Image (cartoon, rainbow, N blue to C red):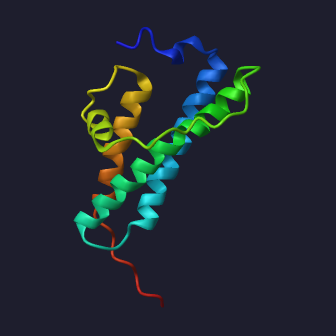
Amino acid sequence: MYDGDSFFTLSGPARIGLALLSLALAAGVLGLLRVGVRRGRLPMRLIAAAAVFYLFEWAAPQVYYQYYRLIIPGLPAQWVIGAPPSPSDIARLAAFQDKAALSEHGRALLFWACLVAAAWPRAPRKAAA
């Protein structure tokens, strides 16, 4: 399924680094949601989660490009963030309708994890003693 994926063109250490970067970014996004979207009604929390994911989807290519600049000599310093994705782009991604690539499927899973993080019941805060 992922035979031609560009991930597999990287060296072993570069793959590990890319996986760790992806996990760190996902943890950051989910952590932001867990801390920042604590209050409010469920529909508003879900909208906030979709908005956070949308911003991630738009800006993350720059972070990944900077990583590739570290592992691939000679890549020029440049801005790679393009136009924001359209709602239909996000819908296709979330429905796993984009190309069969690790990055596409990982981002789709992150979208759904964002919604779960926003919807997860919050434990009541304990009163300070």
Residue at 40% in and 81% down: 126
Q: Nearer the viewer, residue 99 or 119?
A: 99
Q: Is residue 17 left or right of residue 84?
A: right
Relative image position of residue 58 (x, y in whole percent): 47, 43
Residue 95: image quadrant is top left
Q: Nearer the viewer, residue 127 or 11?
A: 11
Labels in figure, total: 0
Residue 21: image quadrant is top right
Residue at 34% in and 42% down: 86
Q: Is residue 22 above or below residue 41?
A: above
Q: Is residue 55 above or below residue 120?
A: above
Q: Is residue 119 left or right of residue 7?
A: left
Residue at 68% in and 34% down: 78
Q: Residue furthest front?
A: 83
Q: Which quadrant does the N terminus fall into? A: top left
Q: Nearer the viewer, residue 122 or 52?
A: 52
Q: Residue furthest right?
A: 74
Q: Residue furthest top?
A: 3
Residue at 30% in and 52% down: 115
Relative image position of residue 83 (x, y in whole percent): 46, 41
Relative image position of residue 73 (x, y in whole percent): 76, 20
Q: Is residue 6 above or below residue 51?
A: above
Relative image position of residue 19 (x, y in whole percent): 55, 30
